[in-house]
Amino acid sequence: MTTKIGENKVVTRFAPSPTGYMHMGSVRTALFAYLFARNHNGKFILRIEDTDKERSKKEFDQAILDTMKWLGLDYDEIYRQSERGTIYRKYIEKLISEGKAFVSKEEVTEEGQRSEVIRFKNPNKKISFKDLIKGDVTFDTTELGDFVIAKSLDEPVFHLAVVVDDFEMGITHVIRGEDHVSNTPRHILIFEALGAPVPTFAHLPLVLAPDRTKLSKRKHGEIVSLEYYRKLGYLSVSIINFMALIGWNPGNDKEVFSISELIKIFDLEKVQKGGAIFNTEKLNWFNKHYIQLLSQEEKFLHLKELGDIPFLNEIGEKINLLNLMTERISNFSELAFSLKSGEYDFLFKKPEYSMDLIFWKGEVDVLKTKERLINVKTILEAVDSNSFNKEVIKESLWPFAEKEGRGSVLWPVRVALSGKEKSPDPFTLSEILGKDETLVRLVYAINLLS
Ligand code: GLU
């Protein structure tokens, strides 16, 4: 904890607008504001900025709540700007009565209709602030003119609402995307005009696509939104771990962090200044890692969440299939896809294959192959069904395989069990299929060779 904070309790906020599904950049902003607050035993506020009546949608508001819950980013308080109109009005009136804002008549329509807006009386001065990430920032506000802070007493614009809220909510640290840096001088002017303490700012570097352009929906499509990864069956722990390392690192090579470890070591001063690359290969790496840590029951629940999956009941009954099926996946929809495309059908129904496949590397010897399969059947019949697991199966078959040639024995057995050119090894398959089914499939192959 190297960031120096005064005696005040740290209060941060995440302030999304409910105008679309949550962007990965927003996930990162939420995470950093959360980690910073929790690291300092502070307060973390969720503020839904829904003043834009046309673009704000209830479903996106709900999506924000779902997302926060799914990510495990618990907040201490929640507000909606649409419910705070009287508060903004009070401050707008105060600014007007103190001569710090004024009603301005605007010429707007072609028909010559006049409308009014409320403008901030810009003191035209240099504003400097120390950004925790960007360092010293200085800005001459003259070029901003007397900017608009409300369309009417009841319609504050973004700048006014944000500042009033940050003040009223006692926000000590404004942690937000770099795209807001240019708004900060306006905000500081308003804080000063309200006689409010100016919070500390930390503007996070942009999240960039691997082509180093800003990660944008228009350009990069749905991969920019968290919803996409949820639908593909990524785990929230992977998303959290992955996003934490976008633009931040702990100063050493460690990469795998639980959320509680992140809370302990998170530090805004270690956030990099330049844009941070969003690399989905890395996300896949994390997700693979975290999938391996799940129990088979947990894996089952994740798979089930993806909806219509073939053989779901069978998998539920033979839960030990899941370690095998998830060995190589980067997300659960890959497994769903394999199941749908029939890749695992052989585990649930008898395989169909042509006899040629059963011969090991051109050893087209029907009698010999048949004899070997009969031997294997005899050996496996002797294995107790209660200890019919891959270790015991391997141990029992190994001497015979060594004697006859491994490929000559194990290839036909594997094909008999899977009907496929490529599949897991025959010991694993036997265990998964169970003793009865293993023997049934061997007999089928033996008969095929008659
Ligand atoms: N509502 C703003 C946005 O979604 C955030 C404003 C802020 O964090 O100050 O970009």
Image: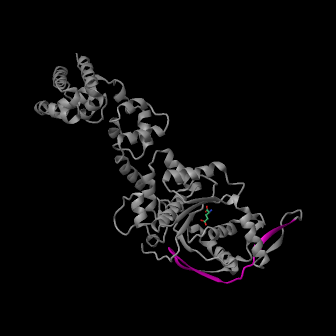
Q: Is residue 430 visible?
A: yes
Please identify the residue farthest to the bottom as the structure is shown. Answer: 125
Residue at x 77%, y 66% (from the top left corner): 151
- Magenta region includes residue 133: yes
- Magenta region includes residue 22: no
Q: Is residue 223 visible?
A: no
For this rendering, which residue is in front, 94 or 174? 94
Q: Position of residue 91 (x, y in %)?
A: 73, 71
Vertical placement of 440 versus 60: above or below? above
Q: How many marks?
A: 0
Q: Position of residue 114 (x, y in %)?
A: 87, 66
Q: Quadrant of ligand 1?
A: bottom right
Specify the quadrant that holds the N terminus: bottom left
Q: Position of residue 431 (x, y in %)?
A: 26, 32
Residue at x 43%, y 53% (from the top left corner): 237
Residue 408, image quadrant:
top left
Residue 299, image quadrant:
top left
Q: Is residue 449 left or right of residue 194?
A: left
Highlighted range, magenta: 114-137
Q: Is residue 299 left or right of residue 203?
A: left
Q: Position of residue 97 (x, y in %)?
A: 79, 76
Specify the quadrant that holds the C terminus: top left
Residue at x 17%, y 19% (from the top left corner): 367
Q: Is residue 295 left or right of residue 392?
A: right
